[in-house]
Image (spheres, grey):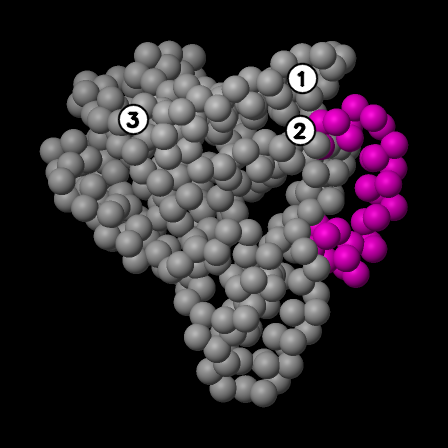
């Protein structure tokens, strides 16, 4: 599921910090998978600023590609920011020739990071929203990689599928398994509200979890509403997840989702999106596992090929693009 943010600058709460992003939009996107704000949550962020007409940047690109491929994508968001005059076709050609599959945006920036008058320039932001390193990623490669490694090791324990993932739970450890996306979490939220009322350190931790859940709910509702018209399958896929997680709150959108579900092709595309999300979470620690995953991905791509695509169908076009981008990522991995 991909939610297109129309603002040129958006806010994201990561840990106790608030980050601002510039040019995280479809209009600024050049290559690789499109990102949404929630993709940065509780992760280490690594950005390289480069330019098409910068010789040192061309030298550093193969190194950046190799580094990005060996990093744990569940812990790190790695992306490129093209900062010279925009030329998407030429930049895409350069990236493709170097096997680059990570996301690249024109003029992407995390607001507030140290600026540099020269490129290539990279920076590392930890899960608390702090810039822990910036400099030339090629001439200072050892320090660059060490900063990433230290930031990754500092990440709180991750709990797959849980809205409590990344929070160092002390008083509300029982919530780690009870706040899983895709299961009814409303009873757990009511208990968290009771803990907030009692006050003390437990209240602060409970309040943090409630905020996380409400933020996720708001983002999902916005994604559903924004996609209903042009990308109904994205709205349906997000809606199904929302309904399972917040069954009472979901009453507000059930009628709209029922209307969307009446179209058979929309249902198939929504299921395809859900399968893609699941496969993206699969562990591929060996070449054989990656090969098997790629076979599953190619099967899904062939299935999409059996569906009728109408002119101007942005919904199906996006689903196909997401699957093809994932296949490209897998093919580019060592």
Q: Which residue sits at x=52%, y=19%?
A: 295
The image shows residue 207 at horizontal and vertical percentages of 55, 73
At numbered mark 3, what does the secondary structure look like: helix, strand or loop?
helix
Say above or below: 79 vs 239.
above
Q: Quadrant of residue 240?
A: top right
* Mark with earlier residue (3, 2): 3
| Figure quadrant of the N terminus | top right
The residue singled out by tag 1 in the image is 303
Instruction: Evaluate if marks 3 and 1 touch, with contact meaning CB atoms under 8 Å apart.
Output: no
Q: What is the spatial separation of the Cα atoms under label 3 and label 2, in whole angstroms?
A: 29 Å
* Mark with earlier residue (1, 2): 2
In the rendered image, residue 202 lying in the magenta stretch gets the answer: no
In terms of depth relative to the viewer, which is nearer, 292 or 1?
Answer: 292
In the rendered image, residue 249 lying in the magenta stretch gets the answer: yes
Callout 3: few (<14), some (14-19), or many (20+) C-alpha neighbours within 10 Å?
some
Q: Quadrant of residue 259?
A: top right
Say above or below: 82 vs 40.
above
The image shows residue 48 at horizontal and vertical percentages of 29, 34
At numbered mark 1, what does the secondary structure look like: helix, strand or loop?
helix
The residue singled out by tag 2 in the image is 272
Q: Is residue 54 visible?
A: no
Q: What is the spatial separation of the Cα atoms under label 1 and label 2, in whole angstroms?
A: 9 Å
| Figure quadrant of the C terminus | top left
Q: Which residue sits at x=42%, y=12%?
A: 89
State the extent of the magenta-drawn residues as a range.
242-270
The residue singled out by tag 3 in the image is 65
């Amino acid at each position: 599921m991909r939610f297109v943010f129309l603002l040129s600058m958006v806010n994201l709460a990561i840990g106790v910090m608030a980050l601002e992003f510039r040019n995280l939009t479809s209009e600024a996107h050049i290559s690789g998978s499109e990102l949404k704000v929630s993709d940065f949550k509780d992760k280490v962020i690594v950005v390289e600023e480069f330019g098409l007409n910068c010789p040192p940047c061309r030298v550093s690109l193969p190194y950046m590609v190799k580094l990005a491929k060996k990093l744990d994508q569940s812990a790190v968001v790695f992306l490129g920011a093209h900062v010279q005059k925009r030329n998407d076709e030429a930049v895409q050609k350069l990236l493709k020739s170097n096997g680059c599959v990570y996301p690249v945006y024109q003029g992407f920036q995390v607001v507030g990071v140290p600026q540099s008058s020269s490129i290539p320039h990279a920076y590392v932001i930890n899960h608390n929203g702090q810039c822990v390193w910036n400099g030339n990623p090629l001439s200072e490669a050892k320090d660059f990689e060490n900063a990433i490694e230290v930031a990754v090791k500092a990440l709180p324990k991750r709990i797959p599928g849980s809205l409590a993932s990344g929070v160092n739970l002390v008083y509300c450890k029982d919530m780690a398994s009870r706040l899983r996306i895709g299961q009814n979490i409303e009873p757990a939220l009511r208990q968290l509200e009771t803990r907030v009322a009692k006050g003390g350190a437990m209240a602060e931790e409970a309040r943090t979890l409630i905020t996380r859940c409400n933020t996720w709910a708001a983002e999902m509702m916005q994604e559903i509403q924004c996609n209903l018209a042009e990308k109904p399958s994205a709205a349906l896929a997000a809606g199904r997840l929302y309904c399972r997680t917040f069954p009472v709150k979901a009453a507000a959108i059930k009628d709209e989702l029922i209307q969307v579900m009446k179209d058979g092709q929309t249902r198939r595309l929504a299921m395809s999106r859900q399968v893609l999300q699941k496969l993206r979470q699969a562990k591929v620690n060996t070449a054989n596992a990656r090969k098997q995953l790629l076979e599953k991905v190619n099967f899904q791509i062939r299935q999409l090929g059996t569906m009728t695509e109408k002119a101007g169908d942005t919904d199906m076009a996006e689903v196909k693009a997401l699957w093809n981008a994932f296949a490209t990522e897998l093919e580019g991995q060592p």
